[in-house]
Image (cartoon, grey):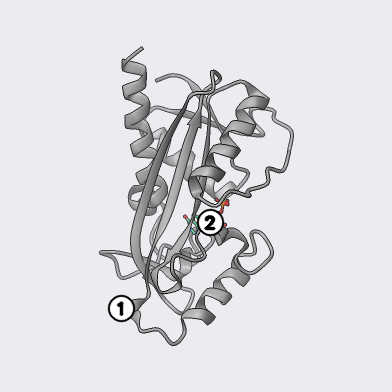
Amino acid sequence: MNDVIVAATQNKHKIKEIEAITKEFGLSVISRSEAGIPDIDIVEDGETFEENSYKKAHEIMKLCGKITIADDSGLEVDFLDGAPGVYSARFAGVSGDDEANNKKLVGMLKDVPYEKRTGRFVSVITMVFPDGEKIVARGEVEGHIVLEEQGGNGFGYDPLFVPEGYDRTFGQISPEIKNKISHRANALHALREKFKKKEESL
Ligand code: IMP
C-alpha cells in the first residue's frame, strides 16, 4: 500500500487527525495544498454524509488525477432527531463557527437530563480512484453531550462530547486516545480493510 493519497479536506484539524491515524497503517496521505491543488470551494449540498463525502473526493480527484479521500462528518444528537447532522459545520449559520455552534447546541439541550443527551459523531470517508471507482467507509463513536465546554484539545463539538466509557470530553482527552477511538479512526480503519481487499483482488 504505497499509493500517495490526496485528502480533499481543507480543515487543518481533520487533516492532522487523518495523517496521524493513517501513518499507523502505512498509507501516505497528503493535503490538497501539498498536492498543488488550487483553493476551490466545494458546495456541500448533499442530504447525507455519503453524498457530501463523495462529492468532495470526486471533485478533487478530477483536479489531481490521484486517489483521493474526503471525510464528511458531524454530530447526531438523539434528542434533536439527529441534528445537527450534515449541517454540523454551519449549525449556527456561519460555516466553521465552532463557538456559535456549541452555544446553540447547549441552548437547545439545557433542560434535557444527561441520560437523554445521547448522540454520536459520524464520519463517512469516501475514496475515489482515477477510474471513477469508489470505496465508502463509515465510522461512529457514541457518547453524551455536556452543557459546559470542557478542555482545549480537538475542534468543533469536542469540548461538549463525552465518548462512551470515558468521563472526560474529547476536548480533555489526548489526541492519541481520540485518534484511537474516534468516528474518524473507525472510518479510516474500515476504509483500510476495504482498500486492502481491493488491492488483493487485483
Ligand atoms: P464537514 O467539514 O462538512 O464535514 O463538517 C464537519 C463538522 O462536524 C465540523 O465543522 C464540526 O463541527 C463537526 N465535527 C466533525 N468531526 C468532528 C470531531 O472530530 N470533533 C468535533 N467536531 C467534529
Which disc number belongs to residue 115? 1
In the rendered image, residue 166, in percent from the top left (x then y), is placed at: 29, 66
Q: Residue at x 43, y 69 (%)?
A: 81
Contact between marks 2 and 1 (CB within 8 A): the answer is: no
Residue 15 in view (yes/no) = no
> Which image quarter is the C terminus in?
top left
The residue carrying pointer 1 sits among few (fewer than 14), some (14 to 19) or many (20 or more) residues within 10 Å by Cα, namely few
Residue extending farthest to the front is 47
The residue carrying pointer 2 sits among few (fewer than 14), some (14 to 19) or many (20 or more) residues within 10 Å by Cα, namely many
Label 2 or label 1, whichever lies nearer to me, is 2
The residue carrying mark 2 has its beta carbon less than 8 Å from ligand 1:
yes
Disc 1, SS: helix
Choose top left, top right, bottom left or bottom right for residue 200.
Answer: top left
Choose top left, top right, bottom left or bottom right for residue 196.
Answer: top left
Residue annotated with mark 2: 86
Q: Residue at x 59, y 47 (%)?
A: 12
Residue in the foreground of this view, choosing between 115 and 155: 115
Task: Looking at the image, tell me whether mark 2 or mark 1 is earlier in sequence order.
Answer: 2
